[in-house]
Image (cartoon, rainbow, N blue to C red):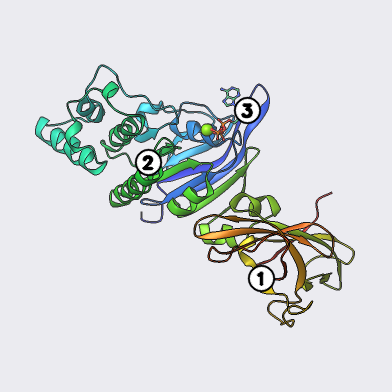
């Protein structure tokens, strides 16, 4: 049935020595879809993947492929019986086999078909002439690409990838990443990709599951997670953020940048207004005055440039704000690199601000 997910992870919890390192994790992945488990080091990403692979056993919850259980409270299929491809952080090639033999390792069937599949995959990972070489003759990045080809060779219905591109340099990584994605999509594989890099997750994922302390705190398309984070930490995971404080009165918060809407927050609630440096607009000082307030941008507030860093396509400017002496950050096109000490006026795009109740 077209609507049955290829992979279902249903309320998985995993305990080590009484400590829950994966807590009630659920998600579903369809054929040809890529889900990224994204989160800081130690949040339980690899453990979740190991449970799906069958290398680790969950304390509760179940894993299904095409509607049939791979593991639940009663049964546990061994990893090799799951039809799941794996590429782990600490991937290893078989040192006594050639590159070609490594890629052919999981393949069965007529010799000519196997040879054709190996050649096709080595070509796709840009290692066309390498079949007869031995792994020790390859660089780290080349070995990683062989591991990728080896995992893809048997056309697994589910592919689990744990930071598979981390050893590649930037230029190579973008190419291999896009190529691998295309290959997996072409073959209708359901992919769970683990990464701690938000840029990688946004580039690769159809869905991102943001993890923290063993739990999925937010799940959705990259656009939605970036533009509607569930809390301050989720916003901060994707970029630098600015935070200003305020108190709600009549569903509004008064700030030096004008009033912000705070629907759903009770009077007296202390809130944090969070916005990204990309959503701060900068304007010139006009004899001690900034631009006129507008409904969209609110009121300008004055700051003095503390530091400006050239970052290639943009500059990151830090301002010491007049209103509280604190720092706010703004990114501007790199043609503009204001000198420290320059007074400028900042406005904040209201439609790009998030208002969260301040945690006590
Ligand atoms: N076999 C184990 N026994 C005990 N604790 C474990 C075991 N495996 C993992 N842990 C602990 O579980 C937590 C989650 O580990 P996990 O490897 O899943 O994190 P991760 O999100 O993949 O991190 P990273 O980004 O650093 O790879 C860590 O605190 C780790 O120390
Ligand atoms: Mg890990």
Task: Please identify the residue farthest to the left as the structure is shown.
Answer: 112
Question: For the residue carrying disc 2, how many other residues have a C-alpha within 10 Å: few (<14), some (14-19), or many (20+)?
Answer: many
Q: Tell me, for residue 158, which label it has, or none.
A: 2
> Do the residues under discs 1 and 3 have CB atoms within 8 angstroms?
no
Q: Is residue 212 left or right of residue 144?
A: right
Question: For the residue carrying disc 3, how many other residues have a C-alpha within 10 Å: few (<14), some (14-19), or many (20+)?
Answer: some
Question: For the residue carrying disc 1, how many other residues have a C-alpha within 10 Å: few (<14), some (14-19), or many (20+)?
Answer: many
Q: Nearer the viewer, residue 189 or 133?
A: 133
For disc 1, the marked residue is 282
Q: Is residue 167 left or right of residue 106?
A: right
Q: Tell me, for residue 66, which label it has, or none.
A: none
Q: Nearer the viewer, residue 314 or 169?
A: 314
Q: Earlier in the sequence, mark 1 or mark 3?
A: 3
Tell me where residue 322 appears, x and y as whole percent: 82, 65
Answer yes or no: disc 3 within 8 Å of ligand 1: no
Q: Describe the element under mark 2 as helix, strand or loop.
A: strand
* Quadrant containing ligand 1: top right
For disc 3, the marked residue is 15
- Tell me the mark number nearer the camera, choosing from 1 and 3: 1
> Do the residues under discs 2 and 3 have CB atoms within 8 angstroms?
no
Task: Please identify the residue farthest to the top as the structure is shown.
Answer: 96
Q: Describe the element under mark 1 as helix, strand or loop.
A: strand
Q: CA distance from mark 1 to mark 3?
A: 50 Å
Q: Is residue 266 positioned above or below 10 on the image?
A: below
Where does the N terminus fall, quadrant-wise? Answer: bottom left
Q: Is residue 11 left or right of residue 111?
A: right
């Amino acid at each position: 049935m077209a609507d049955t997910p290829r992979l279902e992870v249903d309320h998985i919890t995993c305990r080590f020595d009484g400590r829950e390192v994966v807590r009630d994790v659920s998600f579903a992945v369809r054929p040809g879809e890529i889900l990224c488990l994204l989160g800081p080091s130690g949040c339980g990403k690899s453990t979740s993947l190991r449970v799906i692979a069958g290398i680790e056993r969950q304390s509760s919850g179940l894993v299904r492929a095409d509607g049939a259980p791979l593991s639940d409270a009663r049964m546990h299929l061994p990893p090799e019986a799951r039809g799941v491809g794996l590429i782990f952080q600490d991937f290893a090639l078989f040192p006594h086999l050639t590159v070609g033999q490594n890629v052919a390792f999981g393949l069965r069937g007529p010799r000519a078909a196997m040879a054709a599949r190996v050649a096709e995959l080595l070509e796709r990972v840009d290692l066309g002439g390498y079949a007869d070489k031995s792994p020790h003759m390859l660089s780290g990045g080349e070995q990683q690409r062989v591991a990728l080809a080896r995992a893809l060779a048997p056309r697994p219905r589910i592919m689990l990838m744990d930071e598979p591109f981390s050893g590649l340099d930037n230029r190579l990584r973008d190419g291999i990443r896009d190529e691998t994605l295309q290959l997996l999509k072409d073959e209708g594989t359901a992919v769970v990709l683990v990464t701690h890099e938000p840029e990688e997750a946004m580039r690769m994922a159809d869905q991102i599951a943001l993890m923290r302390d063993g739990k999925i705190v937010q799940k959705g398309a990259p656009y939605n997670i970036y533009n509607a984070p569930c809390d301050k930490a989720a916003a901060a995971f994707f970029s630098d953020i600015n935070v200003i404080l305020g108190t709600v009165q009549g569903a509004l918060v008064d700030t030096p940048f004008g009033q912000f809407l705070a629907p759903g927050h009770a009077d007296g609630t202390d809130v944090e207004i969070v916005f990204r440096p990309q959503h701060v607009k900068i304007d010139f000082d006009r004899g001690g005055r900034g631009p006129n307030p507008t409904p969209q941008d609110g009121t300008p507030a004055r700051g003095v440039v503390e530091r400006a860093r050239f970052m290639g396509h943009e500059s990151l400017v830090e301002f010491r704000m007049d209103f509280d002496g604190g720092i706010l950050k703004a990114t501007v096109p790199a043609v503009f690199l204001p000198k420290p000490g320059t007074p400028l006026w900042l406005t904040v795009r209201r439609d790009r601000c998030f208002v969260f109740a301040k945690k006590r």
